[in-house]
Amino acid sequence: RWVAGHETLRQRLQSLDLRLDQRQAALTRIKRRQRRTQRRWGLLVALAVAAGLMLWLVLRPAESTKAGAWARYYVPDTGLPDEAVRESQRPLLAEAMRQFREGHYAPALHALRRVPTSTLGQDTLLYYSGIFLLSQDEHEQTQAAQPLLRRVATQPESGLARKARYHLGMAYWRNQQITAARNTLRAVAADARNPYQQAARTLLRSGALPRE
């Protein structure tokens, strides 16, 4: 009886060991399948993200690309220097330039329009009104800037005429008036006395300006 009981116990223990081994093998297979599934999904997600990025690069709006090119090549005006403003004598002009340098273009334009014409040259008022409008990054403001800058650019006696011609050319480009932009910027690039000559040459050589 003792021998029979011992043999029965041994068989039960062997059966238990076998079931434990089978269970462990099953768990190992499950974990292996889970890891393969996770790697597969990770690869699929990475491929989907890469495909989406490539699709966005191909189909992204042309306007965004044009705006980025314009901003990359545009050299903005820095405004009147403090010694030219004379804040104690012309506080409204000083306020306009301060707002402009801080990127508050609409308040800058509002302050500039309140500056008495008797304290500032007409060409200066026209020029900086055009600059403030051009800086606002909106189609309507860019269009409104053009006649102001054009008036200054066609006043050869004005010290701001050459600068106005460059900004007028960039305003043309922004409004997709390519022929006018190219002709105006070519004139700037050919003018050794224009402070924006190098900027115009760099743009014209870059090919960023669309073909006519």
Image (spheres, helix red, strand yellow):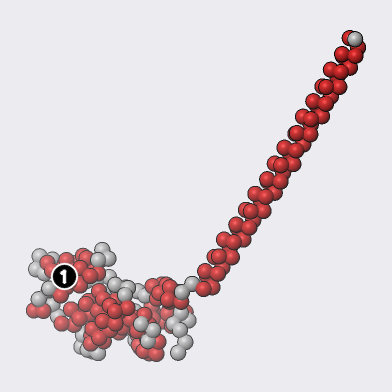
Q: Residue 53 lies in what quarter of the image?
A: bottom right
Place residue 173 in its image quadrant. Answer: bottom left
Q: Is 114 left or right of 29, judged from the image as shown?
A: left
- Secondary structure at badge 1 equals helix
Residue 174 in view here: yes
> Residue 101: where, in percent of width, then height?
25, 66
Query: Which residue is painted at 37% across and 75% down in the image?
Result: 74
Give the x, y percent position of residue 6.
87, 14
In the rendered image, the vertical position of residue 136 relative to residue 7, given as above or below: below
Q: Amino acid at mark 1?
A: Ala
Left or right of 92, for residue 189: right
Q: Residue, x 23% and y 83% (percent of image)? A: 148
Snapshot quadrant of residue 80: bottom left
Q: Foreground: 68 or 38?
A: 38
Give the residue displayed 21% in from the left and 77% down from the top: 129
Image coordinates of residue 18 in percent, x first then y, are 82, 29
Q: Nearer the viewer, residue 28 or 54?
A: 28
